[in-house]
Image: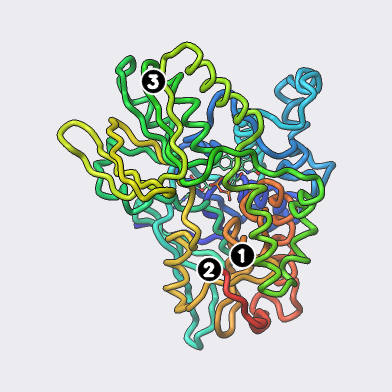
Amino acid sequence: MTHRDVELLAVGAGPANLALAVAIEELAPDVATNSLVIEQADTVSWQPGMLLPDAQSQVSFLKDLVTLRNPRSRFSFVNYLHSVGRLSEFINMGSLWPYRVEISDYFQWVAGSLRNVRLEYARRCTGMEPLRDPDGTLTGWLTRLDDGSTIGSRYLVVGAGRDSFVPEEFAALPERRVIHSTRYLQRIAELPKGLPYRVAVVGGAQSAAEMFDAVQRDLPGCQPSMVMRSIGLKTYENSKFTNELYFPCAVDDFFAARPEARDQMLREMHVTNYSGLAPETLERLYSQLYLDRLTGKGRLRIVTMNDVTAAREDSDEVVLELTDRRTGAVEELRCDLVLLGTGFVRAMPALVQGLADALGLERVEVTRDYRLLVDGPATAACYLQGVNEATHGIADSLLSMQAVRAWDIAKDILARRAAPAGAAAPFPPAPARVPVN
Ligand SMILES: Cc1cc2nc3c(=O)[nH]c(=O)nc-3n(C[C@H](O)[C@H](O)[C@H](O)COP(=O)(O)OP(=O)(O)OC[C@H]3O[C@@H](n4cnc5c(N)ncnc54)[C@H](O)[C@@H]3O)c2cc1C
């Protein structure tokens, strides 16, 4: 078993930790040379399960990994376009919203352009735990990888995304029958084509809608039914006024707000990010449905106001029990394959919860600068990216935040490194606590 030490270890090479790696390279080259990012996959790929060929990002290209922090950075999306020779064409497109595949390619380009921060692929973190000196001071972190090796670090940044949400009704179905959106492209590619699959798509938001659309192309001849609890598909709300809550500077207000105000903001902002569709997706689906009716094919079906209350495999098919919210009537939907557009677990990811358990924390809480609050003296620090919606607002898991959040974290680390007492300067005691999950 090998062990090595670095000053800063970042778990996950998604956009959050790539933004951090760039911030560290630009702001603290000496930290960068002793920093490591580990990624479980063999490459950098943005939400690979839903990297659909024609899907577009829902935020402006100017909210890339750097521009809101440092518009002069060589890691900007514009510099990427220039480097790959597509700047003129992108300008000519006249769109603020790049295709997802090109954002993913941009992230890969950023990863390949790092000069000082090391990035290692095929390294899956299986757990993290605190290291303490004999006095009980927290001095570092031990991160375990699936190959049995370990990495020690003084600073740990967890940016490993969120856990997929699979409702318990589907838990007993065999794996080959159920595909969560996070695995859509990989799993659908493994299926034989040309069979008349009956496909149930569960969910009424963007991922479900995109799968309902994509599966018609990916499994030609299939018959998709989309089942949702809501009254019907709707677009997400995108007022320029409420969109200001996606500005990085909105985090200060949100963090300082009283709990009931935070609840109100999250409740009212829900329709701007969750449970709604991009207008163009909605238009496309409605046209598909219209043409399906016009031509009398009856291939597509949208079932609204229904809960899937049970699911079982019966001989060679899956039987979903649908309960109508209007009448309470129960009907069966027989299908071959279930696609889940059910999103992500709201609670802390298992990896973060495991660390909290190892620290003996009752709750996972972070400071304004995303530093995990721990009990007792500490000379080490851990930061959490993308899982702090409850304290930092609706944009926490989105690209909108990443450039400036990386700056916040980098500044916090640098302030601690520069503390007069040197490397052993203790972190200040934890401020008053607000639960985040
Ligand atoms: C389909 C889809 C579309 C989206 N579109 C947009 C959009 O248009 N605009 C927007 O702002 N946001 C969008 N989002 C939100 C999305 O969460 C963010 O854009 C962004 O991906 C979050 O970045 P992250 O780095 O925090 O997490 P992720 O992007 O999830 O990256 C986490 C990384 O950590 C790696 N990892 C996970 N576990 C481990 C482990 N144990 N060990 C090592 N590595 C690990 C993963 O492989 C991954 O590379 C979308 C989300 C989805 C699901």
Please name the amino acid that badge 1 sits on: Ala
Q: Residue at x 37, y 51 (%)?
A: 167
Q: Is 47 located above or below residue 259 in the figure? A: above
Q: Are marks 2 and 1 in contact (CB under 8 Å)?
A: yes
Q: Residues within 10 Å of mark 1 (few under 14, many from 20)?
A: many
Q: Which residue is mark 3?
A: 219
Q: Check disc 3 and report its element: helix, strand or loop.
A: loop
Which mark is drawn over residue 231?
Answer: none
Decide which of tag 2 and tag 1 comes sooner along the chain: 1
Give the camera-side residue of 181 and 62. 181
Q: Is residue 74 left or right of residue 44?
A: right
Q: Residue at x 50, y 59 (%)?
A: 346
Q: Is 180 located above or below residue 253 in the figure? A: above
Q: Which residue is mark 2?
A: 437
Q: Is 111 located above or below residue 217 in the figure? A: below
Give the camera-side residue of 352 and 390. 390
Q: Residue at x 28, y 36 (%)?
A: 177
Q: Which residue is mark 1?
A: 390
